[in-house]
Amino acid sequence: MDLKRRSRLMQQFIFVGPTSLFFFVIVLVPFFLGLYYSFTSWNGISRHVEWTGLRNYIHIFTKDPSFLNSFWFTAKFTFFGLVLTNLLGFMLAYVLTRKLFTRNVLRTVFFVPHVIGGLLLGFIWQFIFVRGFASVGQATGWSFFNLPWLGTGVTSFWAIVIVFVWQNAGYLMVIYISAINNVPQSLIEASKVDGAGRMQALRHVTIPLVMPAVTVCLFLSISWSFKLFDLNLSLTKGGPFKATESVALNIYNEAYTISRFGMGSAKAMIFFVIVAVISLLQVRATKKREVEL
Amino acid sequence: METTAKKFNVPLLLTELLMILLALVFLVPFYFLLANSVKSYSEILSDSSALPTVFQWNNYAEAWKATDFPHAFLNSLVVTVTSNVLLAFLCSMCAYKMVRNNSRYNRILYVALVAAMVIPFQAIMIPLVQIVSRLGVMDSTAGLILAYLGFGAPMTVFLFHGFVKSVPIDIEEASRVDGSSPYGTFFRVVLPLMQPIIVTVIILNTLWIWNDYLMPSLILQAPALRTIPIATYTFFGQYTKQWDLALPGLVLGITPVVLFFLLMQKYIIEGIAQGSVKG
């Protein structure tokens, strides 16, 4: 009996132990340490960590317009990023589940930007916005290409949105394609027999049945755009004049550019709470709309 | 637009043409990148949308040297492969036991892992660096891999957990009756059954780890340890606006992952679709 218990404990230790340990050391401990630092004025170097209570939090909400600005930027960005990537992703999926000759090649083309990391994509697009667009603008005279793309706050915002949509729509397309393929063809046929047009079949049969995929895609696009960092860093560095600084980049700058680790930690905690709340709300909201077959 | 036009395939053909056009627009950034990567600096400045007149292959040789490409590539490869193998191996074991042994510790751990999935990296990065340096693995490949194991664990365990729940327990009991040890049962019976989800996990983690910039930038300092994103970033800092060097550097940087994708396309697409069902 005792031997059996020991063997069970041993198994638990061998199977679950390593992952628990790494998770504990790399995620849990830093998370709670970060929570602690958020109540201090620690600068990352000094031995002495001074407890300051809620002062960092109060400062952020009352005297730190840069954080609130980055927050507003991120919220706007998330909204447009989410809507546009999902619309484009779904549209591509809807068309590319039809019997086109070049279907597989097209799927590859739309997906390929996603495999390249955000940092490199940002640099590639920096060249396109600065040189490429200008040269197309000269050739065609279209004012769209002659805009100072990375020069003003508004155009830089849209520049990041464009690259983000280009990067991620293909990924959502893949998810939507697999969901659309799982809609039983018989249901579509039945709705057509009942007199539904293509659009009606889409609205009343396909979309309700792919709601689980919508949940997933919304979740993914929210979390990507909320955590926007690499692309932001390499494309605009948050500029011009911090107009396109995402929350993630703002926290990074607070900690590593001006070495206010305590303040950075407080911002990170606020960020965490917001990400958590939004994720929960979104999953709950779309889960309700899912239809069980 | 289309009501009873199904017999004619004209609308379908038009759709196809439209999609091809859209696909070409999608590819335009790659055209700019590739065409200008073989131009001279003055030619890039004079007209960046034209095709190159003289091919300056030398750009590539210089970018290759300036980024120390072979080193960066090798570092990225070592970090990605090692983290992947360990994550898949350790997390599959963990998730399996968590499903099969519903103890209180395992239930709490599962809840903690799922909850941790919403923690943004910025919320742990500051103390994480401190801990990594306390452990004495700062500025080392091992430290970076360790960080990926911890930060990658929640998602990876979650994916395995969902899969194990759908694996019937009967086969395991049969193997147990045949005299196999719990470890033997896992490695010889359960692990082979988990192959589809292992592929998914490896693909998702590869896309993430290979392209990650922030984690290695915090943990690595020595130039010899740089991964591709880090090498590209420092390279860009040095050669800002020197596009005749920067663009071939970027092409080198994206080539491995694009080739990997084109070769493994089928698995990657399936893996993502699989992963999203659980996510």
Image (cartoon, coloured by chain):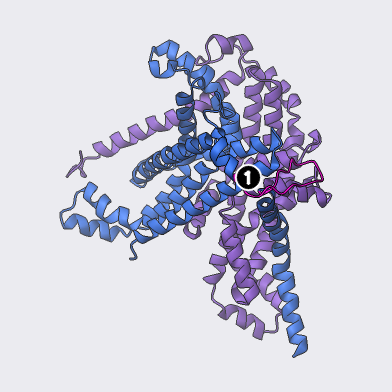
Chain colours: A blue, B purple
**Does the stretch in magenta take in B97?**
no
Span highlighted in magenta in the image: A39-57
- Please, which residue is most extreme toward the right here? B136
Q: Residue at x 54, y 41 (%)?
A: A61
In this picture, residue B41 sits left or right of residue B64:
left
Check the image and report above or below for A106 versus B56.
below
Q: Look at mark 1 in the image and give the residue it sits on.
A: A55
- Counting labels gives 1
In this picture, residue A258 sits left or right of residue B35:
right
Residue B213's spot in the image, x, y percent? 66, 39
Q: Residue at x 57, y 24 (%)?
A: B34
Please state which amino acid type lies under the numbered disc 1.
Arg
Q: Indicate the secondary structure of the residue bearing disc 1.
A: helix
- Please, which residue is most extreme toward the bottom here? A1
In this picture, residue B138 sits left or right of residue B23:
right
Q: Quadrant of residue B174?
A: bottom right
Q: Quadrant of residue A139?
A: top left
Q: Residue at x 32, y 60 (%)?
A: A184
Name the quadrant of the C terminus of chain A: bottom left
Could you tell me which chain the residue with mark 1 belongs to?
Answer: A
Check the image and report above or below for A247 versus B233.
below
Check the image and report above or below for B65 versus A265.
above
